[in-house]
Each structure stands twice: as C-alpha cells, then as structure tokens.
Amino acid sequence: MEYTIKQIADIANISTRTLRYYDQIALLKPAKISDAGYRLYSEKEIDRLQQILLYRSLGIKLSQISPS
C-alpha cells in the first residue's frame, strides 16, 4: 500500500514540512515520486519513520541517525 506525504504526516502527528526536510537530508526518502510529483511512501518508509521518531524521542540528534 502507498501513502501520500499528508497521510504519513497525519499518522505520525508530524508536519509535511518535517517529512520534506527528512527527504532533503536523505534521512527518509519516499518509495517513489508520482507522475504528478507527489511523494509516496510504503510500509518500509513508515517503519523507518518510526525508528527516526523513536531516536528523536530519546534525544538523539538527526545528524547522529544514519540515513537509510
């Protein structure tokens, strides 16, 4: 199943801007980009986002979290 950036942001209770930033710094890349330019995420990226959010809740800096 594929999710849009908005759906992922709502599920994780974070902003779409945060997801775009994670993409920009290569921490969490979308599974693919649609023909219309939308970022689409799969279950794999959702799992990765959960890891990132866990690390952040433990006080780990983004720069210390290795890219996927």
Image (spheres, rainbow, N blue to C red):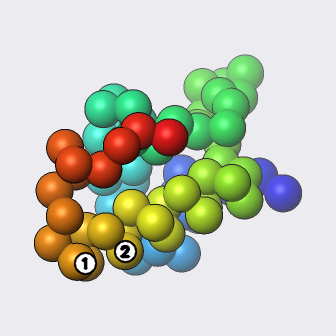
Image vertical order of residue 61 relative to residue 21, above or below: below
Q: In this view, does 14 lie to the left or right of 39?
A: left
Q: Can residue 10 be seen in this view?
A: no
Q: Is mark 1 on a helix, strand or loop?
A: helix
Image vertical order of residue 26 relative to residue 46, above or below: above
Q: In this view, does 22 lie to the left or right of 62?
A: right
Few, some or many residues within 10 Å of mark 1 (<14, 14–19, 20+): few
Query: Going 41% across and 39% down the picture, which residue do you hit?
Result: 67
Disc number placed over residue 57 in the picture, else none: 1
CA gap between label 2 and label 1 equals: 5 Å
Query: Going 50% across and 40% down the picture, which residue do you hit?
Result: 68
Q: Is residue 15 left or right of residue 8?
A: left
Type of amino acid at the residue the image marks with label 2:
Leu
Q: Is mark 2 on a helix, strand or loop?
A: helix
Query: Going 72% across and 59% down the picture, which residue do you hit?
Result: 43
Q: In which quarter of the image is residue 1?
A: bottom right
Residue under label 2, please give it. Answer: 54
Q: In which quarter of the image is residue 27?
A: top left
Q: In which quarter of the image is residue 13?
A: bottom left
Name of the residue lying farthest toward the top: 35
Residue 53, position as x, y percentages in the image: 36, 69
Disc number placed over residue 1 in the picture, else none: none
Residue 29, position as x, y percentages in the image: 52, 36
Residue 39, position as x, y percentages in the image: 58, 38
Check contact, mark 2 vs mark 1: CB within 8 A.
Answer: yes
Name of the residue lying farthest toward the right: 1
Type of amino acid at the residue the image marks with label 1:
Ser
Residue 17, position as x, y percentages in the image: 31, 49
Few, some or many residues within 10 Å of mark 2 (<14, 14–19, 20+): few
